[in-house]
Amino acid sequence: ISIKENISDGPEGILLESMLEGYAEYYSAELAQKIRRGQHDNAMKCMNNGGNIPLGYYVDKATGVLAPDPITEPLAVEIFSRYANGERISDIKRDLEARGIRSNRGNPYSVGSLSNLLKNRKYIGEYKYGDVITPDGIPAIIDKELFERVLFMTIKNLIDAIAEALFQEFGSNYEIYTEKVEQQMDMELNISV
């Protein structure tokens, strides 16, 4: 309802105001429904629906899908490779800062943003929007073997951090505990493969 509309204070004004509010609410709900339908249609075609563009990709203006960016793709591969080879995220972050490398938004990479990057399944070609998941829906720039090595390192580093915390808590039984955790981890990985 516009402030400029003259709506009387009588019963007809109450009815008119109700109708105008109802129409505005209907229009808003209908528009939201159309937007969701359009986004779902885009998702079925693996088109980008907005949000942050992962490092190593750009949105192809002709098709609306993510495509490998020849300029930043090597940096994404480098980050995955370095982490898979045992380098800590904090060390990778410091190196990127020293080299003046920043995110698409112009911010320095944080440990959290690099951690999220290393978990992003778009890098192995998996498109996801809402409940739509399409394997090989976008071009992969990281092979699945490297992605799984990164996942393994993430799990290993988490277990090491937990074990270290337990050592701080319980002392010399740390070595026994670590050995048992590694055996359990090996069993879990063998079961899942």
Image (cartoon, grey):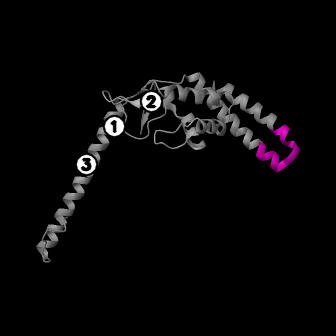
- Real-space Cα separation, disc 3 to disc 1, in angstroms: 14 Å
Q: Which picture quadrant has residue 77? A: top right
Q: Give how far apart the Cα atoms at labels 2 and 3 are.
A: 30 Å
Amino acid carrying label 2: it is Tyr
Q: Earlier in the sequence, mark 1 or mark 2?
A: 1
* Quarter of the image where the N terminus is located: bottom left
Q: Distance between the residues labelled 1 and 2?
A: 21 Å
Does the magenta portion include 158? no
Q: Report x, y in % for residue 101.
A: 54, 36
SS category of the residue bearing label 2: strand
Q: Can you name the residue that lies furthest to the bottom here?
A: 10
Say the numbered circle drawn on residue 107. Answer: none
**Main SS type for the magenta part?**
helix
Q: Which amino acid does label 1 sit on?
A: His
Which mark is first along the chain, 1 or 3? 3
Q: Mark 2 points at which residue?
A: 57
Q: Nearer the viewer, residue 110 or 147?
A: 110
Within-10-Å neighbours for mark 1: few <14, some 14–19, many 20+:
some
Q: What stretch is highlighted in magenta?
A: 164-177
SS class, disc 1: helix
* Mark 3 residue type: Leu
Asked which quadrant contains residue 158, the reply is: top right
Residue at the extreme right: 172
Residue placed under numbered mark 1 in the picture: 40
> Label 3 near label 2: C-beta < 8 Å?
no
- The residue wearing badge 3 is 31
In the picture, which quadrant includes the C terminus? top right
